[in-house]
Amino acid sequence: MEAFDIFLLEAVLNGLLLGGLLALLSLGLNLIFGVIDVVWICYAELIMCGMYAVYYLHVQYHWPLYAAMPAAILIVAMLGVILHQFVIKPVLSAEPINQLLVTGGVLFFLQAAATLAFGIDFKNLGVSLPAVRFGEMSFSAARLIAFGAAAAGVVGLFVFLNKTYLGTAIRAISQDRAIMPLMGVSPARVYTLTSALGGALAGLGACLLVLQYDVHPAIGLSFGPITFLICVLGGLGSMAGGLVAAFVFAQFISVGGFFFAIEWGYVIAFAFFIAMMFIRPQGLFRR
Amino acid sequence: MIGNYPLHLMILVLLWGYIYTSWSVMGRLGMVSFGHGAFMGIGAYTVVMLWNHYGVSPWIGAPVALALAAVVAIVIAYPCFRFKIVGHYFALVTLALSEVTRLIFVALREQTGGSLGATPNGALTEGTSVAIGAVQFSSKWVWLGVVFAFWLLGLWIWRLVDRGMGRLALQAISEDEEAAASIGIHVTRAKLQVTLVSALMTCAGGILYAQYQLYINPDTVSGIAISLQMVFGVIAGGMFVMLGPTVGAAFTLLLAEGLRLAFGNKYPALDTTIYGVMLVLFIIFMPKGILGAVLDLLRRPRRT
């Protein structure tokens, strides 16, 4: 019985670590939705691109990780800007559902292009980090690093949005789209900046994921849906809600996976999501 | 006179044309569902599991699957419509539904074979080509007939919905739900009816798919990938015309097969790469889809 409880505690703590990562992933999506009012269905595919960038720079071109990772973040930030300029901009005034669907097309494209360019085999970074032991529990160092970096990313974004001029402009646009141009803020520039920021967050997520998981073209499908659901559960555009929802989901997956199989953890989390939508359709936190 | 390969292609075009038509019955009325993979999966898995584990004929399995799909559709859709979950939110709730079903099929791997998929137990002994009880036919001609009949049925239902009063009500709802309710349209009921029709049609499509291919896999009959495939097939073909979904199915299939014939298997994902780019271009420049745009072009000179 003693050991059982230790393992349960380990599952809870692992869920906490997973929650930090999921929170970071949902943050970028929430930021973009909050400001531009568009859901990037292909968000997880941008993360996949970032993972490939780290992999190729590090393994193929022998860049050290501390150079490859910032480069990958930069690349994904640029992808975010490209996505906005060439795909989102033309449909900004179209029906919302078209905006959702157009990024779905990008999802197909990125997934297929990755298959074409990199093949379907799983690629491993080849960096193995030791397990960290606390008493009888052990945690992978990659997860601890991911949690720390995710927390730093969340705090960094919060400071940026609240303490800088540009951050204030971004928040202002998300509150009132119509009035800000009159105040001398160019929405187009703010949108571009936000897309870059959202991309950079995806890039940071990619750097953390690539430490733990192998890269393959379909990897986006394995954590993309959960990222959307976290955002919707928290209330699309609400960053605080996204954070809370990420930790709730992570506990369902981790503890549910502990008692049953890992898929059941996901099934429980998704079923919980559907039930919550009926109870609070606007999400946990209304924007 | 016609080889098996073109026959196979024709069957697939009609089968997917039917499934896409089923999706568009509700999709074109402003209810964009990412959850139709769930109904297809329920159809395919219920029938095959009942047959494999209990020896229940698909003739009995099919009504069971349809009933199950109807229950799932109502359980999910009723609260959605009651609480006015529309647009993005509806799409994402239904997306959760299709992932839940896929994960359940994977998680029940003892029974379903998990990610490896499942094959209905063969009922065709040597020398026979038709097993009516098991709904297994070795002749592709039989399948062509069956699928063609379902396709016609799908178009007929599409037309029925299109001509009915319900469509006007639903169109009003998709424009402005509150206003529609204020002139006496029962919003929840109108939406639920169409959703039920669409879900049942898709479920039947899943059953046909399983019986024709004789192989099912959680990823090919349910989940986000197949749900998106339906949505985009319809968008590519044209959502607002009767034959649009079928054109979408033919287009995507012929694109994939054409590129495969041209380049062999050298570039495995070339077709989806091109398809992805085209989808983005379609949604930006040609939101009515291929058939919609062609019809517009044909009509224009006559008017002026």
Image: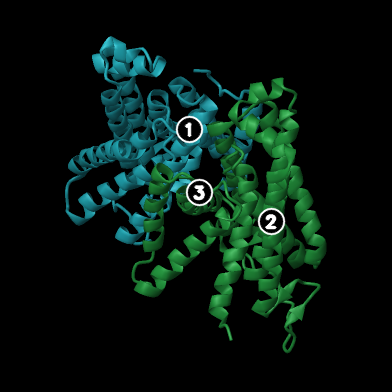
Residue annotated with mark 2 = B154
Label 2 crowd bin: few (<14), some (14–19), many (20+), radius 10 Å: many
Q: What whole-number distance in Å separates the C-alpha atoms at marks 1 and 3?
A: 15 Å
Give the CA distance from mark 2 to mark 1. Answer: 28 Å
Residue type at the position of mark 3:
Ile
Whether labels 1 and 3 share one chain:
no
Closest to the observer, A76 or A88: A88
Q: Amino acid at mark 2?
A: Gly
Chain bearing tag 1 is A
**Image colour assigned to chain A:** cyan
Percent coordinates x, y for residue A151 in the rendering: 36, 26
Q: Do the residues under discs 3 and 2 have CB atoms within 8 angstroms?
A: no
Q: Secondary structure at mark 1?
A: helix
Please, which chain is the residue tagged with disc 3 on?
Answer: B
Task: Please report the residue visible at 41 percent of the width from the left and 56 percent of the height from the top.
Answer: B275
* Badge 3: residue crowd in 10 Å (few <14, some 14–19, many ≥20): many
Residue A251 placement (x, y as % from top left): 54, 33
Mark 3 lies on residue:
B235
Which quarter of the picture shows residue A102?
Answer: top left
User: Which part of the image, by quadrant, shows the N terminus of chain A?
Assistant: top right
**Res A236 seen here:** yes
Q: Is residue B10 above or below residue A180?
A: below
The tint chain B carries is green
Res B179 quadrant in image: top right
Q: CA distance from mark 3 to mark 2?
A: 17 Å
**B114 or B146, nearer to the observer:** B146
Q: Amino acid at mark 1?
A: Pro
Count neighbours of disc 1 (C-alpha within 10 A) and say few if under 14, some if 14 to 19, many if 20 or more: some
- Work out whether mark 3 precedes mark 2 in sequence or the reverse, and give the earlier one: 2
**In the rendering, which numbered label is found on residue A96?**
1
